Image (cartoon, rainbow, N blue to C red):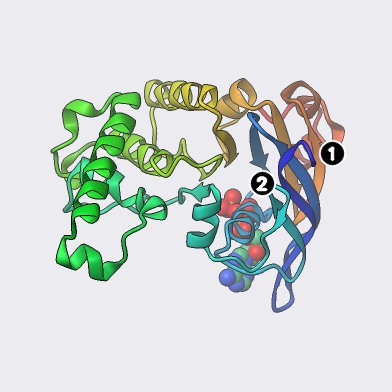
Amino acid sequence: MSAMLLEVEQLSKSFGGVQAVQRVSFGVKKGDIVAVIGPNGAGKTTLFNVISGITPPTDGVVRFRGMTVNGKRPDELAMLGMTRTFQNLQLFADMTVLENVMVGYHPRLKSGIISAGFRLPHTVKEEKRAREEAFACLEQVGLADLAMEQVGTLPYGIQRLVEIARAAVSRPSLILLDEPMAGLNPQESKQLVDVWLAMREQGITFLFVEHDMETVMSVADRIVVLDYGQKIAEGTPEEIARHPDVIKAYLGEEEAAPC
Ligand SMILES: Nc1ncnc2c1ncn2[C@@H]1O[C@H](COP(=O)(O)OP(=O)(O)OP(=O)(O)O)[C@@H](O)[C@H]1O
């Protein structure tokens, strides 16, 4: 079996005449933290949307844990162990922190809507378990004290941590994060990176799209660079920082690193 947790092969996505992603291939090894970078409009979000089942590819293959997963819906991917977060937070502002995290537990639920409605004993037991696991995830991201607070009343940086706790509660093997550092101050970014590193110790692999080069260069094991929908480079942060095509894509012809 392949050592890669995620494999993207010759992936393409067009919107009418726009080739947003063109024959992109790369792999993500289990336990790695991999960044996807590129100038605005390079195709990063589209690539993420295809990998995570939001939109089907025009061509190519996405393989996760050795299985071809093209065409699977996000909820089906979540059951297989792939979950994602979005550029804009998608939390329920009126619900508590704990309830928001419990929402992320649903791929693991065995009870259907009917048994949940009748509150059958196994449903009650499952809900208790979901609550406990959600609370454990909140402890891990340092938010246990805020479990009963309404999410909408909390600062943005805290909401980002709630989001990652919600992604982690389904016990995924891969978390995709779209611009996780957007809107965070340096201290909050560092806190989030520490959370990733701790989760990595528990076997979670990360693939993230990010514009914040300081974070990318300090935390990524590998970086994939897109420009005009194509992969123009892939490598370690050191390799990427001195890659001539990357420098050119970010800064025209000037001799400077992307960060
Ligand atoms: N639904 C869509 N319909 C038509 N064109 C689209 C659609 N989504 C994306 N595009 C186009 O595909 C290209 C890649 O867009 P995408 O949002 O994936 O880039 P990005 O690298 O994520 O950009 P940014 O860094 O600004 O978020 C752009 O030219 C964009 O206009």
Looking at the rendered structure, the secondary structure element under dot 1 is helix
Hey, which residue is sitting farthest right in the picture?
Answer: 244
Q: Is residue 132 left or right of residue 47?
A: left
Q: Position of residue 41 (x, y in %)?
A: 64, 56
Q: Nearer the viewer, residue 32 or 187?
A: 32
Q: Nearer the viewer, residue 166 or 226?
A: 166
209 vs 204: above or below: below
Residue 252: name its quadrant: top right
Q: Residues within 10 Å of mark 1 (few under 14, many from 20)?
A: some
Callout 2 amino acid = Pro
Callout 1 amino acid = Asp
Mark seen at residue 140: none
Tell me if the residue at label 2 has its CB under 8 Å from ligand 1.
yes
Q: Quadrant of ligand 1?
A: bottom right
Q: Nearer the viewer, residue 253 or 189?
A: 189
Disc 1/disc 2 C-alpha distance (Å):
12 Å
Q: Is residue 102 left or right of residue 241?
A: left
Hey, which residue is sitting farthest bottom in the picture?
Answer: 16
Residue drawn at x 64%, y 27% as measured from the top left: 220
Q: Position of residue 59 (x, y in %)?
A: 78, 68
Residue where numbered disc 2 is placed: 39
Residue where numbered disc 1 is placed: 245
Q: Residues within 10 Å of mark 2 (few under 14, many from 20)?
A: some
